[in-house]
Image (cartoon, grey):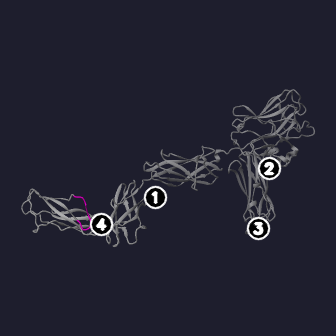
Amino acid sequence: MRFSPVVLALMFILGALATSLPSALTDESHAMKSPSNPTGVDVRVVNATVAYTNFADESLYKMFSSNHPVSGFDRPAELFVIDAMVNISATLTITVENIGTNPSGVIDINTRLLHNDYTYFEFANTTLQMATLAGGGSNTVEVDITPSYAGNHTLSISATSTISDDNPNNDVKNQPFTVGHTYFNCDSSTQWTLGTGWMFSQDVFTYMSQSSSCHAGNGQFSNYNNNQIAVMTTPVMDMSDALENPSRTNGLSFFYTGSTAANDKLTISGKNTFGAWVEVGSITGTVDAVFTDGGSWQTFSVVNKGHTSPLIPVEDGLFHANSQFKFEFTSDASGTDVGFFIDEIVFVYEQKVRPQEYKVSAQGISTNGATPGEWGSITMQIENTGNISEVFIPTLVGLPAGWDAYYMRPSGTSFDPMDGLLTLPGNVAEFTIKIQPDANASIGFQQMSVNITSLQYPNVYTVLPVQFLVKADRVPVIHPPPMRPSCPPSYTCTFEVGLSNEGGATDVFDLQMDMSSVPSDWSINLAWTQTSSVLIRPNETIQAMFTMSVPADESPDTVVEFDLTLQAQNDSSRSDTKVIAVSASMLSDASVSMNNPPQSGKIYAEAGSQVTLKYTIWNNASRQDIFSMRVDVENAGAWTVHQPTRPDAVLNSGTSTTFEVLVDLPTTAQAEDWGPTITPVIESKRSMMEIEGEAFEGL
């Protein structure tokens, strides 16, 4: 695999591409013309330069770093691969100016390093204060930072004045910040393995720093051999923390010079997890073959992942716990040359965030139990107590078989828990789990828990215990009268309606009457002795008493209906509504009397015999009526009075009918023993009126 080299003199183009920013991150340098309530203060961050904090680090990493100028090395300021090295202190020199007209007041300079491959991961955050800037003035402040993650990041710098800024849009400056992972200077102190054909070169102009380079050949004044295979390998490196499929290039870069004959080349390979070497790239040809007049060096420019990068891309599979790279120089028999000199080998890859950056806690907000078969809920919030944005997976543990559950956002929309909830550092994400107990679930508390687990690191989790109450149900039921209540015109009558609780919980139930369909001249109410709230225990039925008053001019058989509702006080969703019908009955006009009563007022009978009493019913009303019949008995003693056995009498207007009552005398009766008092009673099925006849006590 060949990559286009860039000659040092042309590297200005590469650097400009590598450090360009998206338009969203560019900075304006003009003061806002017409802010509301202007103060004349407009602070902005001009730029930030990077240098290594101590000289020893600078001498190791300066050749490929953004620090500029580099003493003794003429390269454009824009030519660099990294800004800093991981876990190495760097010093930022930040220039801030006030392009307003009035003094700014004290300015807070906040510096953050943000990992580009996470929604939000802030792994460095420092705030320093700068003294007030006069209008048109500028100053610098130095900030030391130690990046703890390699890769392509964003340096975000904000300047906030104590006096309100007329143009806050230019208070923040964002710029790329690339951190190297491993840097080799090709000196004898490294743990590299140089096979036959490789050497450390200290020849003048063949190295860039540390007075040494890695050379495939026999020195600057000699040529390499024909038919040569020369291998140089890196130490085994643990690169298992590389982020898969990063947004920018993972790879390596180096400077190289020298020359090869045709068909000879230097191949760079990486070892995969199976131990096989996989080619990464190769170089061949001539950069500079004569070093008596100085040296020319080249590096790389590669379009990868939509960007121009100074790195040779390295595939994800070559980053693992035992990563190793090989530089293999091969030549044929057609001719030789001085060979290649390489120096300043740097590896850059996106390090995934370590587990210690992830922390999570959870708090319960509310729990609403439910009756069997109904929906309840538990509401809680996830708090990201770590340093990085993360998707956390909620899992309900201990849901009994036959129960249902689903997950819901505060907006009311449901979500798949395996998709998780994105939570920024220091923020909370609220959610609700809706739970439906089985219809046959036992009453009482059900112990469950909710696990909140990091998507990236499942070992980062928290557990929130949950007690879900399966409530005893209350089921109100209204039982309308089996026969429609009726009342004669101009009368007030009472009637009863059955009320029961078919649930498992005692409750107080409210009675509500909807009279919207009842004529205004009718009156239907709770009886004055009847309360509007009634206590009903499980499986208990009580009777509620009502009254109705019928207008005097109402036609018989007029039916009126009202809605009666019985609602539980402890669960307003539990209610029952039934239509109760009542009617106006006819006004009965009837009589009942004994047939042929004895003139003496007495009937004599023998002991042990049976006497038959006959009665006649007359319907004197103007319309048909229906009567049931009975006799009321007093002082029966040993006498037996049999109630009438005939069916109810249906009598048209002006007609009559008869019924009989049998009386058994006791066998022990003696002369002059008196029998019971017998009173005939008829009851109209149409008007519900009772009519009594004359009592007879002459037996």
- The residue singled out by tag 3 in the image is 34
Residue count near mark 2 (Cα–Cα under 10 Å), binned few <14, some 14–19, many ≥20: some
Residue count near mark 3 (Cα–Cα under 10 Å), binned few <14, some 14–19, many ≥20: few
Label whose residue precedes the other's in the sequence (1 or 4): 1
3D distance between C-alphas at marks 2 and 3: 33 Å
Q: Tell me which segment is drawn in magenta.
A: 646-655
For this orientation, the residue located farthest to the right is: 293
Viewer-proximal residue among 459 and 699: 699
- The residue singled out by tag 1 in the image is 573
The picture quadrant where one finds residue 489 is bottom left
Q: Is residue 636 visible?
A: no
Residue 188 at x, y = what percent? 80, 35
Q: Is residue 559 visible?
A: yes
Mark in the foreground, 3 or 1: 1
Position of 639 relative to 549 (above/below): above
Mark in the foreground, 1 or 4: 4
Position of 52 relative to 543 (above/below): above
- The residue singled out by tag 2 in the image is 19
Residue count near mark 4 (Cα–Cα under 10 Å), binned few <14, some 14–19, many ≥20: many
